[in-house]
Image: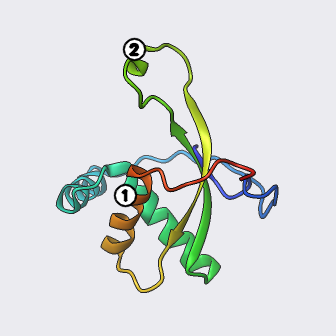
Amino acid sequence: GGITREAIAGKRWHEAACVFTAVPAEAVAAVRRAAQRLAVPEDVLMLAAMGITLSWLDAQYLEPLAVIVPQRDRTGEHDSVGLFADVRHLTICTEGLSFAGVALHLHRVIQERLWCAPGL
């Protein structure tokens, strides 16, 4: 897993768990269609769904998350061998937004790297 609330400001809200499950082909197809219609990557759409769910469960409009992000953006880094990823903190805002609005806003946050490194 690459998403957790535990890494934020050293706080610990819950015991971590990892769950693997098979996703029905129809659900995968629906996610792909929705991502295509919104012109966002599938992983951004899934992150939006998780953020909205956590926001709803926590009864708050801002959901802070720690996300593991790839760090292979510069020329030639795609040819590098090794783990080039790091933890970044971002906040998913749901106030006044539809699911599509959250997904589009999150896509912009990720594209423009509007997140921060831990401890900053």
Which residue is at the front of the view, 86 or 13?
A: 86
Which residue is at the front of the view, 93 or 27?
A: 93
Question: Looking at the image, which residue is at 42% across and 31% down?
Answer: 73
Q: Quadrant location of the N terminus? A: top right
Compared with 26, 71 (above or below) is: above
User: Disc 1 to disc 2, how far (Cα)?
Assistant: 25 Å
Q: Are marks 1 and 2 in contact (CB under 8 Å)?
A: no
Which residue is at the front of the view, 118 or 95?
A: 118
Q: Which amino acid is tagged 1? A: His
Residue 93: image location, x then y, percent = 50, 73
Question: Looking at the image, which residue is at 37% across and 59% down?
Answer: 108
Residue 27: image location, x then y, percent = 30, 57
Give the left or right position of residue 24, taking residue 16 as reference. Answer: left
Residue 86: image location, x then y, percent = 61, 37
Give the left or right position of residue 72, taking residue 31 as reference. Answer: right
Say the numbered circle drawn on residue 107.
Answer: 1
Say the numbered circle drawn on residue 79.
Answer: 2
Say the numbered circle drawn on residue 13.
Answer: none
Residue 83: image location, x then y, percent = 56, 23
SS class of the residue under badge 1? helix
Give the left or right position of residue 120, taking residue 109 as reference. Answer: right
SS class of the residue under badge 2? helix
Compared with 81, 92 (above or below) is: below
Furthest-bottom residue in view? Answer: 96
Disc 2 crowd rating (10 Å Cα; few below 14, some 14-19, many 20+) is few
Q: Which amino acid is tagged 2? A: Asp
Question: Looking at the image, which residue is at 25% across and 57% down?
Answer: 35
